[in-house]
Image (spheres, grey):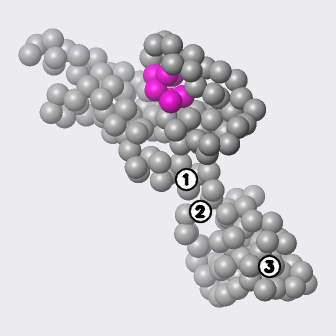
Amino acid sequence: MILAFANILNDKTFAEKLCEKSKEAISDFLEYYSDELYYIASKFNYRGMPQDSWEYRTKTGYSIQVSDEVADTYLWLVNQATNKSCAYKGKKGASFSTFIKTVLNSNFTFKDWLKWKTGVTGYVPKCISTLGNPCIDIFRLLRENKSPNVICRKLDLDNTDYVEYFNRIEESLIISNQIDLLH
């Protein structure tokens, strides 16, 4: 019992340092959890299509193909882990390892990754909502990284109308200091 309590205290200290983004804690985290992070990143990105990639070999000898998308997801997961480590409390004797693996493998993390990857959040700022449709629809499609041609086809707009609506959206976002939602 005393050893388990000591481990939880060490885990709490480690989680706090990771939460504070200590370079040493991040380095230790990467040393210990890289296999898990690459595995999750690969799982999130798997599409069954061959891609240019390099091979990452886990400590247990398992091979993971690492494409640019997997590498980007790996970095995103590291950032998520540092943020999520702030919530670790060691409740009911849970180790940091159990906590962070559970969090990173959760459906919530996968959904957050999808939102990050696709830009699809459903969020429409008030300044765009007041413009009404089709500005709201155009904004949502732009957040999904759809091209102007795709947006015009999908919403049955001609290019001139699209440019007019886009300019209204952009101006509204600039005025409300939210232009970063588009770019």
The answer to whether any part of residue 137 appears in the image is yes
Task: Kindly report which numbered mark, 1 or 3, lies closer to the viewer in this rendering.
Answer: 3
Q: Mark 1 is on which residue type?
A: Leu
The magenta stretch is 33-39
Residue at numbered disc 1? 114
Residue nearest the observer in this picture, 40 or 32: 40
Q: Which mark is residue 120?
A: 2
Q: Quadrant of residue 118?
A: bottom right
Does the CB distance between marks 1 and 2 fall below 8 Å? Answer: yes
| Circle 3 SS class | helix
Q: Is 66 rendered above or below residue 76?
A: above
The residue depicted at 36 percent of the width and 27 percent of the height is 15
Q: CA distance from mark 1 to mark 3?
A: 25 Å
Q: In the displayed image of the protein, which residue is found farthest to the left?
A: 1
| Residue 37 magenta-highlighted | yes
The answer to whether any part of residue 12 appears in the image is no
Residue neighbourhood size for the residue with mark 3, other residues' Cα within 10 Å, grouped as few (<14), some (14–19), many (≥20): few
Q: Mark 3 is on which residue type?
A: Arg
Residue at numbered disc 3? 153
Q: CA distance from mark 2 to mark 3?
A: 19 Å
Residue nearest the observer in this picture, 57 or 98: 57
Q: Earlier in the sequence, mark 1 or mark 2?
A: 1
Would residue 15 appear left or right of 65 to someone viewing this image? left
Residue nearest the observer in this picture, 121 or 39: 39
Q: In the displayed image of the protein, which residue is found farthest to the right?
A: 160
